[in-house]
Image (spheres, helix red, strand yellow):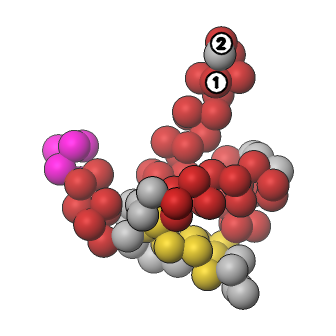
Amino acid sequence: MGRDHTLMESKIAMILEILSDGKWHGIEELQQRIELDEYKVQEIATFLNKYDFATIDGANKKVKINRDFQRFLAQTTT
């Protein structure tokens, strides 16, 4: 675990913070904003999609947070 695990958790948190506005965000935009390679950003997006936290538009390489999860995040941060 260690440093790599903590770093990945913080990158996931950063992605969730960006996605919390409920809008579509491009994979390229996310990788530039949080300084991760495309593969890692895609991996995180796939994880979020798998657990129904986000929706992926594969054709346009975009990701968007699901409304129910967005509400949950808003409740936990206020």
List the single residue furthest toward the front. Answer: 50
The residue at 72%/87% (across/down) is: 59
The image's mark for residue 5 is: 1
Instruction: State whether residue 48 appears in this view.
Output: yes
Instruction: State whether residue 33 appears in this view.
Output: no
Callout 2: SS: helix
Q: Identify which amino acid the numbered label 1 is placed on.
A: His
Distance, label 2 to label 1, CA atoms, is 6 Å
The image's mark for residue 47 is: none
Callout 1: SS: helix
Left or right placement of residue 71 versus residue 29 in this view? left
Q: Which quarter of the rendering shows the C terminus?
A: top left
The residue at 29%/51% (across/down) is: 73
Q: Main secondary structure of the magenta part?
A: helix
Mark 2 Cα-neighbour bin, 10 Å: few <14, some 14–19, many ≥20: few
Cβ atoms at labels 2 and 1 below 8 Å apart: yes
Residue 7 x %, y %:
64, 28
Residue 36 x %, y %:
76, 47
Residue 38 x %, y %:
80, 58
Residue 3 x %, y %:
68, 16
Left or right placement of residue 71 versus residue 11 in this view? left
Q: Which residues are magenta?
A: 74-78
Quadrant assignment, res 51:
bottom left
The image's mark for residue 2 is: 2
